[in-house]
């Protein structure tokens, strides 16, 4: 079973950047597709980005619009989400997902 722990969230001003990390343990994620989701209160969790095994393919939600980059370091068993040009609408709890396993989430707040 995979345990996922997100970190890197926080408060940032509009236009700023954050890098989220998702550290995996318990089972290797090297052969697993990894994803980032986000959720705001009262709304369904939505896909932000996903990365294939080996990082060959990356898919992003339309709202990312070239601002975010997902990556993985299998040697460190960690997946990243680099978020640039953040907007207030990006405020949410961001979750890491691997197969049926979710992390606890990390809060991202974009506000001046």
Image (cartoon, rainbow, N blue to C red):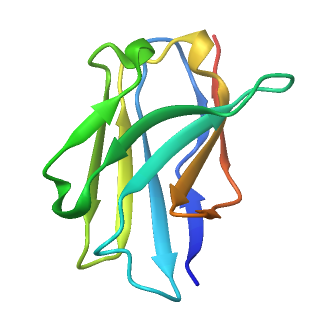
Task: Report x, y in % for residue 43.
Answer: 78, 23
Task: Report x, y in % for residue 107.
Answer: 68, 40
Give the residue displayed 24% in from the left and 40% down from the top.
Answer: 58
Q: Which of the pair 35/14 is nearer the observer?
A: 35
Report the residue that reaches farthest toward the bottom.
26
Give the residue displayed 47% in from the left and 70% down from the top.
Answer: 23
Report the residue that reaches farthest toward the right.
42
Give the residue displayed 60% in from the left and 11% down from the top.
Answer: 88
Left or right of 80: which side holds 96? right
Task: Report x, y in % for residue 19.
Answer: 41, 43
Report which quarter residue 37 is drawn in.
top right
In the picture, the quarter occupied by the C terminus is top right
Q: Which of the pair 72/110 is nearer the observer?
A: 72
Left or right of 104: which side holds 15? left
Left or right of 112: which side holds 55? left
Task: Report x, y in % for residue 68.
Answer: 33, 29
Report the residue that reaches farthest toward the left.
56
Residue 110 against residue 18 in the figure, above or below: above
Give the residue displayed 48% in from the left and 75% down from the top.
Answer: 24
Residue 84 against residue 85 in the figure, above or below: below
Q: Which of the pair 74/33 is nearer the observer?
A: 33
């Amino acid at each position: 079973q995979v345990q996922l722990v997100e970190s890197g969230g926080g408060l940032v001003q509009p236009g700023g950047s954050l890098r989220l990390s998702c550290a995996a343990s318990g089972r290797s994620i090297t052969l697993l597709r990894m994803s980032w989701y986000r959720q705001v209160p009262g709304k369904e969790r939505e896909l932000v980005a996903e990365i294939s095994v080996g990082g060959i393919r990356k898919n992003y939600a339309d709202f990312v619009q070239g601002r975010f980059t997902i990556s993985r370091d299998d040697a460190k068993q960690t997946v990243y989400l680099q978020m640039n040009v953040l907007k207030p609408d990006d405020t949410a709890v961001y979750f890491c997902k691997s197969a049926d396993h979710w992390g606890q989430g990390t809060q991202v707040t974009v506000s001046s």
